[in-house]
């Protein structure tokens, strides 16, 4: 038995090494530059839409209502935030600090600002090129790549990558983090936690996209507000250190802090990587949710989804980062070996950092609260991941009967992946997740850079109608778009 265990561990180690190598190739400096460059380009092309229309972003959150075919703007916002606000906001932020140092937080902020431009473009395109399938709106990168770029093979490649990413790779990160946090807080076996997650998730995913939207619109505000309130108390208890924390973040981001002077590349790399993983801007998942919205103009949903990027990073991720840094309960690995900062000996970067931060103000409460918060953050993300997977299954299977069967199968497969994800190693889960995010980001960002003109014309049409005192209503022919079937 011992020799069998050694063989299994050896093969597992080889698998983990291969996965990490692939992840490193995908997440090369090229993807970092592509994400930052695309965000900067869209920011300039939209004339800093992220700032000029910030009031409209908030306004459209609460306008419109769901229909028999689609969801309301707030429901799609909640669905997108479900995907954005998850493990990345607690464990991901801690990991970025542990490997990239405090400066990684600044680069998370930067990619969120620039990423809002990418989120606007991709979500507007999703609305322009959405379709009606089985009585409900469907859309996203696969749809606008096929209809806008006229490249069927590229669309199929994205759909397959998304099914692999959100259906097989990414769910394991969420369930793994839930299992680790619950085990750390309550000493409950990950196998038991996994069974509970699957039972709850099964009730929702088998209820269809309407049930997912309804659950998201109630659960997301509850979990986010509760988490930010606790973070505010922790920060308030250490408020005198707040200027010092922001100074540390800014100095470390540009190698001006002596302790982290040699980590500029790591700060940028991990800040951008974890920022994109958390807010998903440019990744191609947000537009899948955006396409389900019932709106009168595609730009309205583009603005709503741009705001969801701000909400994820500037509010929730920042709350986590400041909690960790202001309480000083974190480690920072030295790229050359050992640690630059080691305030939590033997603790790996992840939920434990945030749990320790809360415990400094609420002794004995941190582990349980973060486990509770992480459960809901990750659970809602799993709901979103399932929806993204199902939408791309619907794209690939055009025949109704074949589509119904494929969706039925993917539901069981998805739940199985979630269950076994609770028992995988954290490092393997993150590496697989990075592969999924990276593949989708490469394919989608290149696509929206080529196809951005319809979205930019759509924004100008929206602004023209607003200037004339109208409530913008979209007609595709008014801006020369003829390859969309919905807005005719």
Image (cartoon, rainbow, N blue to C red):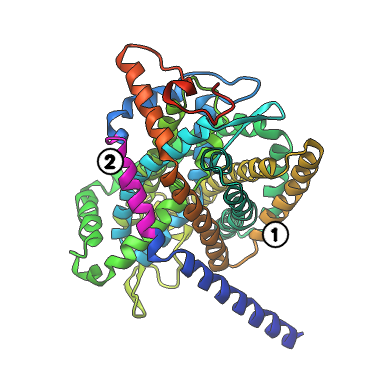
Q: Image quadrant for the C terminus?
A: top right
> From which residue to which does the magenta span run?
32-48
Contact between labelled residues 1 and 2, with CB atoms less than 8 Å apart:
no
Q: Is residue 293 visible?
A: yes
Residue 44 belongs to the span the image colors magenta: yes
Judge by depth and name the residue closer to the eye, 416 or 53.
Answer: 53
State the mark number for residue 191. Answer: 1
State the mark number for residue 258. Answer: none
- Is 325 left, or right, of 438 in this rendering? left
**Which residue lies at the image location 28% right of the left edge and 59% below the top edge?**
103
Q: Residue 38: x, y in percent?
A: 36, 49
Q: Identify whether 426 is placed above or below 62.
A: below
Q: Residue 111: x, y in percent?
A: 34, 49
Residue beneath label 2, please? 44
Q: Residue 101: x, y in percent?
A: 32, 64
Q: Residue 254: x, y in percent?
A: 21, 61
Q: Quadrant of residue 94?
A: bottom left
Q: Secondary structure at mark 1?
A: helix
Residue 138 belongs to the span the image colors magenta: no
**Mark 2, other Cα within 10 Å: few <14 / some 14–19 / many ≥20:** few
- Is 291 left, or right, of 277 in this rendering? right
Q: Identify whether 205 is placed above or below 33.
A: above
**Which residue lies at the image location 33% right of the left edge and 52% below the top edge?**
37
Task: Report the magenta stretch's main SS.
Answer: helix
**Mark 1, other Cα within 10 Å: few <14 / some 14–19 / many ≥20:** some
Mark before the other along the chain sequence, 2 or 1 = 2
How far is disc 2 from disc 1 in space, using C-alphas? 49 Å
């Amino acid at each position: 038995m011992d020799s069998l265990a050694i063989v299994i561990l050896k093969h597992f180690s080889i698998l983990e090494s291969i996965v990490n190598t692939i992840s490193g190739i995908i997440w090369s400096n090229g993807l970092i530059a592509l994400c930052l460059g695309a965000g900067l380009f869209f920011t300039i092309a939209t004339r800093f839409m992220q700032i000029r229309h910030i009031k409209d972003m908030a306004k459209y959150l609460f306008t419109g209502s769901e229909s028999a075919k689609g969801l309301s703007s707030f429901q799609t916002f909640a669905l997108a935030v479900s995907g954005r606000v998850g493990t990345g906001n607690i464990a991901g932020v801690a990991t970025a600090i542990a490997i990239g140092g405090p400066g990684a937080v600044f680069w998370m902020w930067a990619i969120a600002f620039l990423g809002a431009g990418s989120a606007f473009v991709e979500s507007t395109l999703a609305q322009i090129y959405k379709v009606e399938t089985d009585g409900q709106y469907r859309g996203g990168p696969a749809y606008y790549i096929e209809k806008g770029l006229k490249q069927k093979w590229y669309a199929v490649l994205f759909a397959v990558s998304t099914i692999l990413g959100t259906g097989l790779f990414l769910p394991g990160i969420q369930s793994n983090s839930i299992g680790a946090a619950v085990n750390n807080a309550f000493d409950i076996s990950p196998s038991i936690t996994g069974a509970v997650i699957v039972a709850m998730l099964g009730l929702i995913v088998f209820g269809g996209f309407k049930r997912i939207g309804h659950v998201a619109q109630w659960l997301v505000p509850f979990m986010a507000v509760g988490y930010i309130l606790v973070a505010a108390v922790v920060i308030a208890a250490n408020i005198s250190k707040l200027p010092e924390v922001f100074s540390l973040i800014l100095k470390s981001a540009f190698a001006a802090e002596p302790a982290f002077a040699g980590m500029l590349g790591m700060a940028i790399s991990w800040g951008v990587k974890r920022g994109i993983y958390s807010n998903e801007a440019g990744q191609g998942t947000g537009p899948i949710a955006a396409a389900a919205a019932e709106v009168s103009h595609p730009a309205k949903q583009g603005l709503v989804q741009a705001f969801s990027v701000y909400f994820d990073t500037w509010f929730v991720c920042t709350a986590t980062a400041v909690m960790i840094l202001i309480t000083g309960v974190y480690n920072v690995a030295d790229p050359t070996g050992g640690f630059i900062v080691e305030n939590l000996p033997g603790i790996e970067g992840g939920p434990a950092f945030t749990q320790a931060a809360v415990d400094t103000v609420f002794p004995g409460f941190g582990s349980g609260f973060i486990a509770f918060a992480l459960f809901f953050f990750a659970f809602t993300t799993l709901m979103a991941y399932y929806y993204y997977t199902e939408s791309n299954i619907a794209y690939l299977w055009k025949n109704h009967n074949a589509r119904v069967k494929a969706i039925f199968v993917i539901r069981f497969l998805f739940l199985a992946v979630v269950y076994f994800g609770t028992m995988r190693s954290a490092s393997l889960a993150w590496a697989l997740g990075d592969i999924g995010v990276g593949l989708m980001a490469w394919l989608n960002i290149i696509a929206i850079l080529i196809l951005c003109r319809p979205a930019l014309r759509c924004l100008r049409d929206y602004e023209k109608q607003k200037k004339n005192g109208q409530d913008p209503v979209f007609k595709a022919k008014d801006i020369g778009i003829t390859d969309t079937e919905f807005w005719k």
